[in-house]
Amino acid sequence: MVVAKRVGVDVILWLAMAFVVAVEGGKQRVRPVIGPDIYEGHNVAKDVLAPGEKINNVMSFGAKPDGKFDCTQAFMDAWRATCKSKVQARILVPQGKFVVSSMYFSGPCTTPGPVTVQVEGTVIATTDISEYADGEWLMFQDLSGFKLIGGGTFDGQGKDSWSETENCETTNSESACVRNPSSIFFDNVSNGIIQNIKSLNPKGFHIFITNSANIRLRLLKLASADTSPNTDGIHLSHTINVKISKSTIETGDDCVSMIQGVSNVSIKRLKCGPGHGISIGSLGKYENELEVRGIRVENCTLVGTTNGLRIKSWPEKYAGLATDISFTDVTMENVKNPIIIDQEYQCTPGNCKKKPSLVKIANVDFINVKGSTISPIAVDLRCSHQFPCQNVRLHNIDLKLVPSPAGSRCANIKPIYGGIQMPPACP
Ligand SMILES: *[C@@H]1O[C@H](CO)[C@@H](O)[C@H](O)[C@H]1NC(C)=O
Ligand SMILES: *[C@@H]1O[C@H](CO)[C@@H](O)[C@H](O)[C@H]1NC(C)=O
Ligand SMILES: *[C@@H]1O[C@H](CO)[C@@H](O)[C@H](O)[C@H]1NC(C)=O
């Protein structure tokens, strides 16, 4: 397949991004290389109108807040006016219910300063899945400086589509599982903020971010039933410099999932559950996968999730690397697999007949992880026989299984233990 190729990288100068051509699932992909973070050192929590900033209310472009009228054209017209504005500009979606189908919010924009989409009301997805042939619901792409804010709600109306989809995590299919459209999709966005919004019942992922850099996700409330398949809360691929904080995710799949090409991610004060926990991987699924590096998870709570902190890779298949990862100050409540490295993904644990995973896992810290589990194996570290995990540290682990004590399992790993170990360390 295609070999990753560097095309004109210039890290220092004004160019917000340069690109590395990469491949995911046989499809050409671009990966941004970090440019300047325009929000660094600014208080992003505050939304202030820039002097002379133009407000484009979707109602002025023909949108009707009745929850029936198709507002797609009105939103597109409002976007065009905003993105092509000569002065800084924003879209306002006021109180009310606005139905829109699949649509693009594409740049590059000519406005000075970041473009804002301020949603105060509820944006509702149409339910006819055939309208989503382009892939996702609300697609924000090729933007440099973008904010999605306002306290409003994105209702993906996913229920009908869930019944027609296979569950990518439980079916043992190794073929690409067909994804339903994500509600909010960022592709090639740099300096993006998603703050103070709610997402309900997406058809696919709540938020999907790819080929992007310098992204902040704050004060989000993402919710769908624990039975909704493949509804990851925040899914990241090929993305650099992400801060996720102060958010609540209740969903039917991973709360946060990070796959190839993701680096420098901080996740703080996230409450997750129900859901499948915070996941790195699955890795080693595609040829020429880019590494996952520099993931810091701190001060998070997982409640009733099937997994807690998980790194997973496919046996056999392709090479990959996950390194420099830390999980610190994490509280578990009734979590099934609180700490799990699974390099036998979708293969019988401990009796996998496939060749070992080619993904390397190194420099992973689990520090101050406490609470309760519902599983007899609370710490499950199953690494590759060919590439045993390197430098995995467990410090102050305190996980209780009521009434019996919880246990550990280790394969192809010599963890470095420190502090309390409950369950007891592997022999
Ligand atoms: C990414 O977006 C920027 C605008 O922010 C644009 O200039 C650039 O061409 C886009 N890259 C690709 C590969 O489309
Ligand atoms: C990692 O991201 C943070 C912002 O989230 C940024 O301040 C820092 O410079 C980044 N580190 C690297 C090595 O890019
Ligand atoms: C952890 O989170 C809680 C609330 O979620 C907050 O009050 C506390 O300050 C945080 N601690 C650290 C060390 O960030």
Image: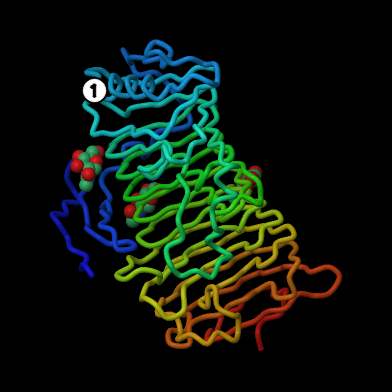
Q: Which residue is mark 1?
A: 84
Outermost residue to the left: 8
- 51 or 20: nearer the viewer: 20
Q: Where in the figure is residue 184, as x and y percent of width and height?
A: 44, 39
Which residue is drawn at the image coordinates 59% and 73% (left, top)?
Answer: 394
Q: Quadrant of the N terminus?
A: bottom left
Where is 109 relative to 174, above or below? above
Q: Where in the figure is residue 84, as x and y percent of width and height?
A: 23, 22
Task: Answer few, some or many: residues within 10 Å of disc 1's Cα (few below 14, many 20 plus, some between 14 and 19).
Answer: some
- 140 or 167: nearer the viewer: 167
SS class of the residue under badge 1?
loop
Which residue is drawn at the image coordinates 84% and 74% (left, top)?
Answer: 404
Where is 355 relative to 225, above or below? below
Q: Quick check: is the Cβ at mark 1 less than 8 Å away from ligand 1?
A: no
Q: Where in the figure is residue 308, as x and y percent of width and height?
A: 62, 62
Where is 263 relative to 346, above or below? above
- Residue 2 lies in what quarter of the image? bottom left
Q: Where in the figure is residue 207, as x and y percent of width and height?
A: 47, 44
Which residue is drawn at the image coordinates 34% and 24% (left, top)?
Answer: 76
Outermost residue to the right: 403
Which residue is drawn at the image coordinates 29% and 36% (left, top)?
Answer: 143
The amino acid beneath tag 1 is: Lys
